[in-house]
Image (tube, grey):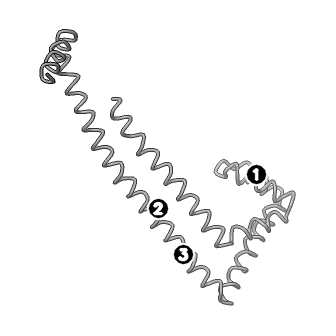
Amino acid sequence: MKKTFIKSSISHAKNIIGTTLFLSVCSSSLALFNVGQANAQNLGQNLEQIRREAREAESQVDKQLTGVQTILNTTQGRALLESQKAQIRNQFMDLLSNELLYEQALANPSISQHQKNLLRIFKVNPQALNRYIDQQSNPEYLAEQQKSKIRTQTEVARNRLKIRPLRSTLK
């Protein structure tokens, strides 16, 4: 009974859409299914690779943080950091106190708008400069910033991978 029903359904479909179109649709569906299966498998493997690389990158950041903290736990390391912070602070203060240099920096196209905005803030509020230098010399803060970038890049890569199979099936 089932064989008769299937044969009549196939015959009916052949009569409605034509033998060539029927076979074309069937083979296209199978090809799409196989591509979808292959893409799903590749997607899983690629997603796992992205996760692995992100874990490795974050682990590397943690190792670097530990190394920097070890150095900063020494008297010599802390002295070097404080010396560098003072040098940077003095360079900024020299720039901010010299109106010509300050205006040239603001007019310089190679300096980003964000950096120009920081210069304006530092000019008005020198304590903001001190807070900024302290923040940018804080290894925990910098490590968290790097990890945040890694997470963002990981998410972007995951989204690209998820979109790629959809694009290939739509072509």
Measure the C-alpha gap from mark 2 to mark 3. 15 Å
Amino acid type for the residue under numbered disc 2: Ala
- Residue at the right extreme? 124
- Relative to 126, does residue 103 appear above or below in the rendering? above
| Residue 11 image point, x, y percent | 15, 14
Q: Quadrant of residue 88?
A: bottom right
Looking at marks 3 and 1 on the same chain, the residue that comes earlier in the sequence is marked by 3
Q: Quadrant of residue 135?
A: bottom right
Which residue: 66% across, 68% down?
141
Measure the C-alpha gap from mark 1 to mark 2. 32 Å
Amino acid type for the residue under numbered disc 1: Asn
Secondary structure beneath label 3: helix
Looking at marks 2 and 3 on the same chain, the residue that comes earlier in the sequence is marked by 2
Which residue: 50% across, 51% down?
155
| Quarter of the image where the N terminus is located | top left
Which residue: 20% across, 14% down?
13
> Closer to the observer: label 2 or label 3?
2
Q: Residues within 10 Å of mark 3 (few under 14, many from 20)?
A: some
| Most foreground residue, 153 or 83 | 153
Q: Which mark is residue 64?
A: 3
What residue is pinned by disc 2? 54
What residue is pinned by disc 1? 117
